[in-house]
Amino acid sequence: MVPSQHPPRFPDMPAFEAGWVWLVGAGPGDPGLLTLLAHHALGQADVVVYDALVDDDILNLANPDAELIYAGKRGGKPSPKQPDISDRLVSLALAGNRVLRLKGGDPFVFGRGGEEALTLVAAGVPFRVVPGITAGVGGLAYAGIPATHRETNHSVAFITGHMAGGEVPDGIDWAALASGGQALVIYMALKHLEAIAGFLVEGGLAPSTPVAVVSRAATKHQWVLETVLGDAAGDVEASGIEAPAIVAVGEIVRMRAGLDWLGAIEGRTLDPDPLGQTSQRKTG
Ligand code: SAH
């Protein structure tokens, strides 16, 4: 056995060079879910351009000399337009800064990371992408919901519940999503939940299909609402649960009865057979 080292030796990290932009995912909230590369970048950056979804506990890990620039969007308040943010990244990099663009979750999952990176490409600014744990996977895991489970689903769809302009996306084939037997993980779903649930039921999903709404997942304020498709919009309204929230639709939600590990820490008794299938389970 190799003796363990204390402190443990981390792998060599690439140098964060002046004039570069690192497009980094911060994960869903818990600073412990940052990657080693994200942590390294926070310590090195001259400027951190961050989103509304990035937790203060994570920003506190930035080098104290780093300039922190807020570039998020908050409902109802004026917010920087996307081209402004991308242009800002370019000018900060051209001025010789090490620019950390920090985004909630993963930068390439409903995060416009691709758009920002293409602006960098057009301007000839070198960049690196550091993936993060997306809310639709890590946030659900903090609610005890697996994205896939052999007995419930063989595929999962990541869906956006609204478009840049705020309307329900019209390019989505809700009927196809409803019919595939897949788990649905919907980002930005709260505003249009009633319409979305309606499309899914029209598309063939039973109104009794399990739904979980996970608000502020993986933060100290995590709040999980369990409901069913037919009641989801009304229950969200009545409960006052707020964005950011991720919505899971499908049998995976039932796994929470067995896998709500955070709840178990607080005394919840977990059910080792959440699907009630022990007798039917295949062996091997
Ligand atoms: N790039 C991000 C997604 C940005 S879109 C990622 O990979 O996670 C913004 C949406 O992400 C929110 O409306 C919400 O649906 C979801 N989201 C992000 N962080 C979340 C969190 N901590 N808890 C619940 N939902 C979250």
Image: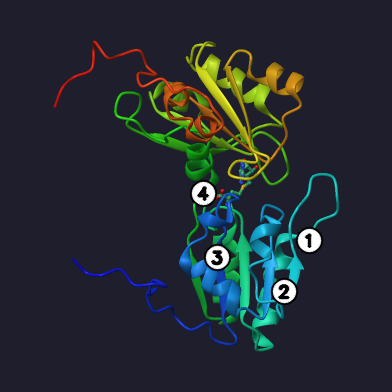
C-alpha distance separating marks 2 and 1: 10 Å
Precedes in sequence: disc 2 or disc 1:
1
Precedes in sequence: disc 1 or disc 3:
3
> Is 176 located above or below residue 138 in the figure?
above
> Is 28 located above or below residue 253 in the figure?
below
* CB-based contact (under 8 Å), mark 1 and mark 3: no
- Kind of residue at badge 4: Thr
Q: Which residue position is annotated with label 1?
A: 80
* CB-based contact (under 8 Å), mark 3 and mark 2: no
Q: Which mark is residue 24?
A: 3
Precedes in sequence: disc 4 or disc 1:
1
C-alpha distance separating marks 4 and 1: 23 Å
- Kind of residue at badge 1: Pro
Quadrant of the frame with the C terminus: top left
The answer to which image quadrant residue 191 occupies is top right
C-alpha distance separating marks 3 and 2: 16 Å
Quadrant where ligand 1 appears? top right
Residue placed most toward the observer, 27 or 205? 27
> Which residue is found at the position 53% from the left and 56% from the top?
32
Q: Which mark is residue 88?
A: 2
> Does the numbered disc 2 mark a residue whose Cβ is under 8 Å from ligand 1?
no
> Which residue is found at the position 42% from the left and 24% from the top?
258
Could you tell me residue 124's position as x and y percent? 56, 82
Could you tell me residue 170's position as x and y percent? 61, 34
Q: Which residue position is annotated with label 4?
A: 134
- Camera-side mark, 4 or 2: 4
* CB-based contact (under 8 Å), mark 2 and mark 1: yes
C-alpha distance separating marks 1 and 3: 19 Å
Residue placed most toward the observer, 267 or 168? 267
